[in-house]
């Protein structure tokens, strides 16, 4: 089972860090090779580049990470409760028997 809070925070921080790296990359490379058009399409009201726009993009990226991380953890945990415990129990028995071999 995934920890909902941990997974959500990890995905949110990853998305925010990815946004910052994309912006830094866009500032140090020529305009023809960075992704400002993609960011403007994916992040509503984001426009390349001003302080207010940067903070808005950072907040939106963080919230997308919350949405994706939380959603993934909830779906994963629901599937795990339904099918994961039986499958895991069978593989755990097999793994345990592989760890201890009395004939050695």
Image (cartoon, grey):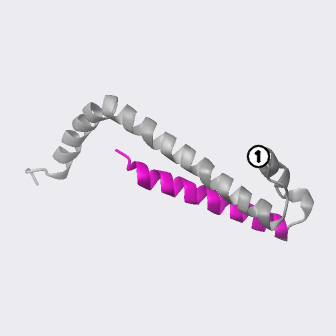
Instruction: Indicate the secondary structure of the residue bearing disc 1.
Output: loop
Q: Which residue is mark 1?
A: 44
What residue is drawn where x is 8% and y is 50%?
103
For the point 49% across and 56% down, which residue is it?
9
Q: In the image, is 65 to the left or to the right of 99? A: right
Q: Position of residue 67 (x, y in %)?
A: 56, 44
Most prominent secondary structure in the magenta stretch?
Answer: helix
In which quadrant of the rendered view does residue 94 lie? top left
Badge 1: residue crowd in 10 Å (few <14, some 14–19, many ≥20): few
Q: Is residue 70 left or right of residue 80?
A: right
Q: Residue 60 location in percent, x, y?
A: 67, 52
54 within the magenta span: no
Q: Nearer the viewer, residue 80 or 71?
A: 71
* Residue in view at x 38 percent, y 38 percent: 77
* Magenta stretch in the rendered image: 1-27
In the displayed structure, would residue 11 be above or below residue 51? above
Say which quadrant the C terminus sits in: bottom left
Q: Position of residue 76 (x, y in %)?
A: 42, 38
| Vertical order, 77 against 104 (above or below) | above
- 37 lies above or below 20: above
Instruction: Please give the name of the residue rendered at 73% of the width and 57% of the height, measured from the top-left corner.
Output: 56
Image coords of residue 68 (percent x, y) = 56, 44
Residue farthest to the left, as pictured: 102
């Amino acid at each position: 089972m995934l920890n909902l809070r941990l997974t959500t925070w990890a995905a949110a921080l990853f998305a925010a860090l990815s946004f910052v790296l994309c912006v830094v990359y866009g500032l140090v490379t020529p305009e023809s090779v960075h992704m400002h058009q993609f960011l403007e399409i994916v992040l509503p009201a984001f426009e390349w580049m001003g302080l207010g726009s940067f903070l808005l993009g950072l907040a939106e990226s963080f919230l997308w990470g919350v949405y994706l991380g939380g959603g993934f953890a909830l779906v994963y945990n629901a599937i795990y409760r339904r099918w994961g415990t039986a499958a895991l129990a069978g593989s755990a028995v097999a793994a345990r028997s592989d760890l201890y071999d009395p004939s050695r």
